[in-house]
Image (cartoon, helix red, strand yellow):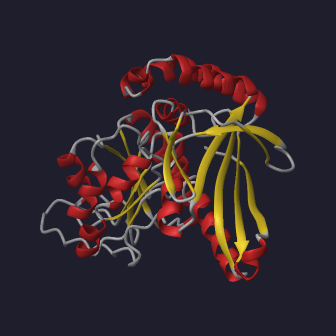
Amino acid sequence: MAAMVRACMPLRTPPAAASSTATAPAAPSKPRSSARVLVLGGTGRVGGSTATALSKLRPDLNILIGGRNREKGESLASELGEQSEFVKIDTGNAAMLEKALEDVDLVVHTAGPFQREAECTVLRAAISTKTAYIDVCDDMDYSWRAKAFHEEAKAQGVPAITTAGIYPGVSNVMAAELVSAARSEDGEPERLRFFYYTAGSGGAGPTILATSFLLLGEDVIAYNKGEEIKLKPYSGVLNIDFGKGVRKRDVYLLNLPEVKSAHKFLGVPTVSARFGTAPFFWNWGMEAFAKFLPVELLRDKDKVGKLVKEIDPLVRAIDGIVGERVSMRVSISFISISELYSSHFYSKSILLVLKLYLQ
């Protein structure tokens, strides 16, 4: 669902450094690993957590922290050790990106929000420099623009994956597992529903706030019996049981990319996605924003960014009270082919609750 290029290849091993002919002794070079990974948005909470996790998983990697905040980037690089360094990068500058990717084996794009981004600048640069690419995009329009590069990436031999975060990403895998299980039991999926719950910012910091506000300015794309329909954002509330520790929570319709992917690639005729947060009054605020704020404001990234700066300190304070937690529930309804004429429907769900410990 998320993959644009299914083929994989090992990370390249950098060539040995050329011997120096200078008479003066050269400064000791920084230790190099077998591969270099650039994390864009590395000074943010999602990117920083990604870099930290990669460092722990593969201590041999040379991790580049890409971002605009030198102080934060160098601080994180120092924490990760000698294998890491900060690289100042503007993701909107194609020339700067291509130069940065010349000696990189993999670029991880976490510099959201992806909403209202007109160009896939990082993906273009990755294909141009033949650098493996992965992003955590959570925007429907951006993800489908990215998928349009499938043939170009394939022709260049560039592995490229979009929408590979928690949701979409892990939730897509959950959905694919449910569809596969239904069909293995002689069933045909009729309806697939994604439900997400986030306590406070869910550990993602201001990025999730900006994403949520920008999504309030988009019509919700859903599918009903194979027909694409448009619904109002943050409407259609349902009370969903997320299991022990989270219990029942209200969730609301949002325009998320996994809906279209599940319909197009998994062949499920009815698909929707809903999201809710805590404390409960945040949901009331989101409803009010969707109903009363001008759509033009909610579609303006600069204005939304300013709004987030005002609200973020309050959200962080409340996060300390309610905690930072993410829960996902993916539910499928399917009809048994062997019992088609008696119309017996079945339902299954996969539930995943994550308590986040982000750096």
- Residue 317: x and y, percent? 69, 23
Q: Residue furthest right?
A: 244
Point 76% across, 65% down: residue: 348
Q: Is residue 81 left or right of residue 85?
A: right
Q: Position of residue 342 (x, y in %)?
A: 79, 74
Up the image or down, 257 lies above or below 197; here it is below
| Residue farthest toward the front in the current orientation of the protein | 341
The residue sitting at 65% across, 54% down in the picture is 193
Residue 357 appears at what percent x and percent y?
68, 46
109 vs 118: above or below: below
Which of the two residues, 25 or 158, is positioned nearer the viewer here?
158
Residue 41 visible = yes
Direction from residue 146 to residue 192 in the image, left or right: right
On-image quarter of the C terminus: top right
Nearer to me, 273 or 209: 273
Q: Residue at x 53, y 16 (%)?
A: 292
Depth check, front residue: 149 or 63: 149
Q: Quadrant for residue 202, please give it.
A: top right
Labels in figure, total:
0
User: Residue 177 falls in which quadrant of the image?
Assistant: bottom right
Say above or below: 24 vs 97: below
Residue at x-position 51% and y-position 23%: 308
Residue 323, horizontal then vertical, whole percent: 75, 35
Asked whether the viewer can see residue 78, the reply is no
